[in-house]
Image (cartoon, rainbow, N blue to C red):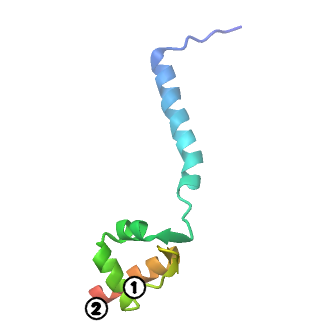
């Protein structure tokens, strides 16, 4: 029966490969988008201020739903509005 000697370098390579494999398994779960997002998330996503977000609501550029004091935006609507703004900027 042959014996192999495992070196610290072998263990380090195994650790790196194992971590990469675990990250690949976890990554799809992390990238799942919520259907409805709050104002703070929209501001962060678009890189805009709360005043600009309010203007987008007021002028009808961005649809929203209000429940109590919270305002929610459909993620797909935010992406659609962003693409529309991007197209206007490229014209």
**What quarter of the picture does the C terminus occupy?**
bottom left
Labels 2 & 1 near each other (Cβ < 8 A): no
Report the number of numbered marks: 2
Q: Which residue is mark 2?
A: 91
When the figure is inspected, residue 31 is found, relative to residue 49, above or below; the finding is above
> Helix, strand, or loop for circle 2?
loop
Q: Is disc 1 placed on a helix, strand or loop?
A: helix
**Would you place residue 62 above or below residue 19 in this image?**
below
Residue bearing the label numbered 1: 57
Crowding near the residue tagged with mark 1, few <14, some 14–19, many ≥20 C-alpha atoms within 10 Å: some
Residue nearest the viewer, comparing 25 with 44: 44
At label 2, counting other C-alpha atoms closer than 10 Å, the crowd grade (few under 14, some 14-19, many 20 or more) is few
Name the quadrant containing residue 87.
bottom left
Whether residue 86 is visible, yes or no, is no
Locate residue 63, reporting x and y percent.
Answer: 47, 85
Q: Nearer the viewer, residue 51 or 47?
A: 51
Mark 2 and mark 1 lie on one chain; the one further toward the N terminus is: 1
Q: Position of residue 86 (x, y in %)?
A: 33, 82
Picture residue at 57% right of the left edge, 47% below the top = 26
For image coordinates 42% across by 71% down, the residue present is 39
């Amino acid at each position: 029966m042959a014996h192999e000697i495992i070196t610290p370098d072998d263990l380090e390579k195994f650790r790196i490969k194992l971590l990469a494999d675990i990250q690949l398994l976890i990554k799809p779960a992390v990238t799942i988008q919520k259907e409805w997002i709050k104002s703070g998330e929209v501001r962060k996503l678009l890189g805009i201020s709360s005043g600009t977000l309010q203007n987008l609501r007021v002028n009808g550029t961005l649809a929203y739903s209000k429940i109590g004091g919270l305002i929610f935006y459909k993620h797909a609507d935010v992406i659609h509005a962003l693409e529309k703004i991007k197209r206007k900027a490229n014209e």
